Amino acid sequence: MAGHKRKRDSEPAKSSATRERILAAAAKVLSHKGYSETRLTDIAEVAQLRAPAVYYYFDSREALIAEVMAVGQSRLRDHVETALAALPPDLDPMDRICAAVQAHLQVELQLSDFATAVTRNMGQLPDDVRGRLRQEGGEYISLWRGLLEAARSTGAIRGDLDLRAARMLIMGALNWTPEWWNPEQGSLAGVVATAQSLVRNGLGYPASQPVA
């Protein structure tokens, strides 16, 4: 009896691990093939499962992809929030923005197929799937809006800039990096430092121009 109980107790953990394996496989395939070219058979092959087994965990291809997108958005935001929370509370607002730039690029280029799957496929998703993801995406946009507004309130950002346009341009540039970055042609550290320099100098005042 004890042996049967241990077997039953292990089943939920095994099921959860398999579900995570499917999600990770789907994120990997989406990152490389894109939404339109991703097939359940491809995902099952990467997950080392038979294709019909995927339907035990997800009702459809669209449901699986929507879950990957939701996980990707959540993990990106969590990583950036964690990086910001570790900073000294009195850190200069522009330094906080640069820390967010670094954290975002780390996830996109090094840490997560999920985040890359989101940025590469969001524009290809059906309207109903995109609608389900707007709340999570809105929370991440709010994070960046807060960073920029805090920097503007201290005079670190030039008053002539449109903050919404600045936010969209920064996030768009960061999200596009998986499309062109090649680790054989430049280091991640180099990309991060360049992005931080562009953001800092693009938002702030030139060194010869004092803050009013």
Image: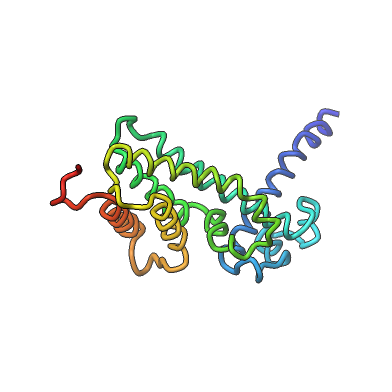
Q: Tell me the residue at 59%/45% (across/down).
A: 136
Instruction: Say which of 77 and 52 sits in front.
Output: 77
Please tell me in which quadrant of the rendered image residue 59 appears.
Answer: bottom right
Q: Position of residue 74 (x, y in %)?
A: 56, 45
Task: Pick out the residue farthest to the left.
Answer: 208
Image side of residue 34 versus residue 156, left or right: right
Q: Tell me the residue at 77%/62% (across/down).
A: 51
Vertical comparison of 20 with 51: above or below: above
Vertical comparison of 43 with 88: above or below: below
Query: What count of labels does the image hold?
Result: 0
Q: Position of residue 174 (x, y in %)?
A: 42, 57
Instruction: Say which of 25 and 83 sits in front.
Output: 83
Q: Quadrant of the N terminus?
A: top right
Q: Is residue 109 visible?
A: no
Q: Tell me the residue at 54%/56% (across/down).
A: 113
Q: Position of residue 190 (x, y in %)?
A: 30, 59
Image side of residue 209 versus residue 105, left or right: left
Q: Position of residue 92 (x, y in %)?
A: 28, 37
Please tell me in which quadrant of the rendered image residue 3 appears.
Answer: top right
Task: Pick out the residue farthest to the right.
Answer: 1
Task: Pick out the residue farthest to the bottom.
Answer: 37
Please tell me in which quadrant of the rendered image residue 27 appears.
Answer: bottom right
Q: Tell me the residue at 68%/59% (across/down).
A: 127
Q: Is residue 17 visible?
A: yes
Vertical comparison of 194 with 99: above or below: below
